[in-house]
Image (tube, helix red, strand yellow):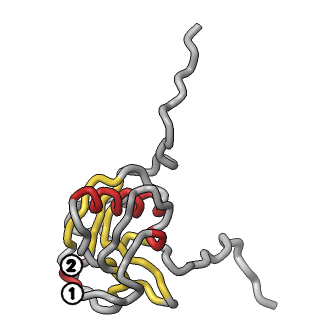
């Protein structure tokens, strides 16, 4: 019969899941790279058409949160040379979303972008979910 070495169960990939592919020219850390989003059985990229610096920050925060990393710190055009699908464009996030597919966008695969506009981001390392209220101070004795 077949022998199975113990492995972790396969990761189920769902539409809207993110991953970072890199390192990019941002440097070499686990927490940065070209942003890819999964949809309809295929990984594709995200275009940088986002309106205003506040929206860029909010979108970056949502991406880092969804990836399970800490705070968003940096965003750049990746100048990607990859081919394939560009899935998302004109993202409009408020910053409170838990997943990028909860943000407004043009529709899956609807874009006017080239891969030179693919987003790459940097997050801080894993800090768990960001606090939603003021931190609780331990009482001092």
Residue pointed to by mark 2: 117
Residue pointed to by mark 1: 114
Above or below, 28 relative to 3: above
- Kindly state the secondary structure of the residue where label 1 is placed: loop
Q: Residue furthest right?
A: 1
Pointer 2: residues within 10 angstroms few (<14), some, or many (20+)? many
Dots 2, 1 in contact, CB < 8 A: yes
Q: Quadrant of residue 5?
A: bottom right
Residue 64: image location, x then y, percent: 40, 59
80 displayed left or right of 7: left
Residue 33: image location, x then y, percent: 31, 68
Residue 102: image location, x then y, percent: 48, 70
Above or below, 135 relative to 18: above
Above or below, 126 relative to 138: below
Label 2 – label 1 distance at C-alpha: 6 Å
42 displayed left or right of 85: right
Observer-nearest of 47 and 2: 47
32 displayed left or right of 137: left
Residue 124: image location, x then y, percent: 36, 51
């Amino acid at each position: 019969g077949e022998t199975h070495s113990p492995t972790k169960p396969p990761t189920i990939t769902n539409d809207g899941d993110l991953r970072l592919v890199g390192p990019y020219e941002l440097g070499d850390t686990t927490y940065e790279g070209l942003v890819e989003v999964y949809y309809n059985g295929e990984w594709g990229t995200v275009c940088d058409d986002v309106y205003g610096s506040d929206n860029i920050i909010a979108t970056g925060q949502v991406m880092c949160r969804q990836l399970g990393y800490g705070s968003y710190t940096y965003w750049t055009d990746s100048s990607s040379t990859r081919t394939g699908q560009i899935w998302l464009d004109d993202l409009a996030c408020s910053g409170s979303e838990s997943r990028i597919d909860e943000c407004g966008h043009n529709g899956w695969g609807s874009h006017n972008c080239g891969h030179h506009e693919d987003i790459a981001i940097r997050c801080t390392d894993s800090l768990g979910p960001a606090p939603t209220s003021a931190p609780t101070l331990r009482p001092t004795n």
